[in-house]
Image (cartoon, rainbow, N blue to C red):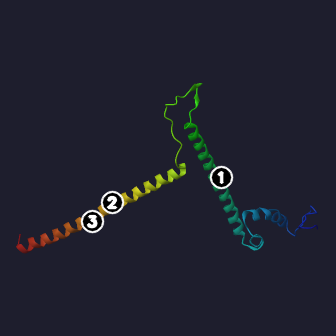
Amino acid sequence: MGDRLTGEDKRQTSPTPYGDIFDELFPRYLLFGMTPEQYWDGEYGLKRAYREMYKLRMETEQIITDRQNWYMGQYIISILNSVPLLVGGLNVKATTPLPSYPEKPFLEKAMEIKKEEDRKKQEEDRARLAMAMFQAGIAKFNKRFEKEHSKDKEMSGQ
């Protein structure tokens, strides 16, 4: 029938037609991070999970690479904006103020802004909660006062 490991014979080398397909896919699943034991002896659902995990990893890496390239473009634009250039064949005056190169990475700035916005939102939430608790306390006090006042009116006969 041929050697399964060397593939010397092109005829079917396994007792089932699916055996050859499993042999062909084996290196791919090793690339996905599966161990040989997991591939050959593990649950079928595990193969699907590794396949999906690999697909998600590739998508995530693509998003990260895309963002890195975008940020690199932003840095290049910032550099070009921070040096005098020839504009339309005319020299830009040396006295013209030019924007400076950013002190921090853009993502770091964005994270700081997000952190500050989150802090402000938490502060607002705490203020709203304190106001609600204060109003609930006032309502409870007023209710108790009205009860006591109505008891006093009943006792005095009014």
Q: Mark 2 highlights which residue? A: 127
Picture quarter with the C terminus: bottom left
Q: Amino acid at mark 2?
A: Ala
Where residue 55 sits, quadrant-wise, is bottom right
Where residue 128 sits, quadrant-wise, is bottom left
Q: Which comes before the other along the chain, label 2 or label 1?
A: 1
- Near mark 3 (Cα within 10 A), the count class, few <14, some 14-19 or many ≥20, is few
Query: Where does the image place residue 24, in percent across and percent down from the top left?
Result: 82, 62
Residue 62 image label: 1
- Near mark 2 (Cα within 10 A), the count class, few <14, some 14-19 or many ≥20, is few
Report how far apart the C-alphas of labels 3 and 1 lie in the structure.
Answer: 52 Å
- Residue at the spot x=60%, y=49% of the render? 67
Q: Is residue 156 above or below residue 28?
A: below
Q: Which comes before the other along the chain, label 3 or label 2?
A: 2
Q: Is residue 9 left or right of residue 127?
A: right
Q: Which comes before the other along the chain, label 3 or label 1?
A: 1
Query: Where does the image place residue 43, in percent across and percent down from the top left?
Result: 72, 72
Q: Amino acid at mark 1?
A: Gln
Q: Residue furthest top?
A: 89
Q: Nearer the viewer, mark 3 or mark 1?
A: 1
Report how far apart the C-alphas of labels 3 and 2 lie in the structure.
Answer: 14 Å
Q: Would you say the residues marked 2 and 1 are in contact, meaning their CB atoms lie under 8 Å apart?
A: no
Report how far apart the C-alphas of labels 2 and 1 lie in the structure.
Answer: 42 Å
Picture quarter with the N terminus: bottom right
Query: Where does the image place residue 93, in percent across and percent down from the top left?
Result: 52, 28
Of residues 123 and 1, the one drawn nearer to the viewer in this rendering = 123
- Residue at the spot x=65%, y=58% of the render? 56
Q: Mark 3 highlights which residue? A: 136
